[in-house]
Image (cartoon, rainbow, N blue to C red):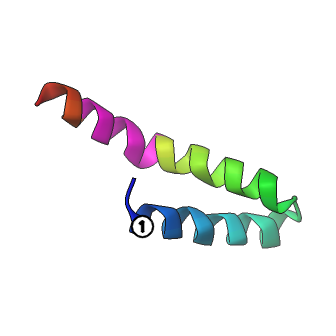
Amino acid sequence: MQADDLSWIRRRARRLQRAFTVTRRRAVREAARDWWQMYGKARSLRGAAA
């Protein structure tokens, strides 16, 4: 995971926290799950194929 990935998660968590008034921890967990669904699986599969 790169620094830009972490900033994506941080931005997403901030948006989730504002939109749904959830705790920061919950927002970060949800944002990380979203990141994994969108980017993580593709990267892990690409690494396995190499």
| Range of residues picked out in magenta | 37-45
Q: Which quadrant would residue 46 be assigned to in this image?
A: top left
Q: Is residue 43 above or below residue 21?
A: above
Residue 25 within the magenta-colored segment of the rendering: no
Q: Position of residue 48 (x, y in %)?
A: 21, 26
Please indicate whether residue 28 sits to the left or right of residue 40 in the image. Answer: right
What residue lies at 59% left-to-right and 43% top-to-bottom? 33
Give the SS element for disc 1: helix
The crowd level at tag 1 (other Cα within 10 Å; few <14, some 14-19, many 20+) is few
Q: Which quadrant would residue 3 be assigned to in this image?
A: bottom left
For the C terminus, the quadrant is top left
| Amino acid type indicated by mark 1 | Ala
Between residues 34 and 4, which one lies in front from this camera angle? 4
Q: Position of residue 45 (x, y in %)?
A: 26, 30
Please indicate whether residue 1 sits to the left or right of residue 6 in the image. Answer: left
Q: Is residue 47 above or below residue 1?
A: above
Q: Which quadrant would residue 17 be assigned to in this image?
A: bottom right
Residue marked by disc 1:
3
| Majority SS type along the magenta span | helix
What residue lies at 31% left-to-right and 34% top-to-bottom? 44
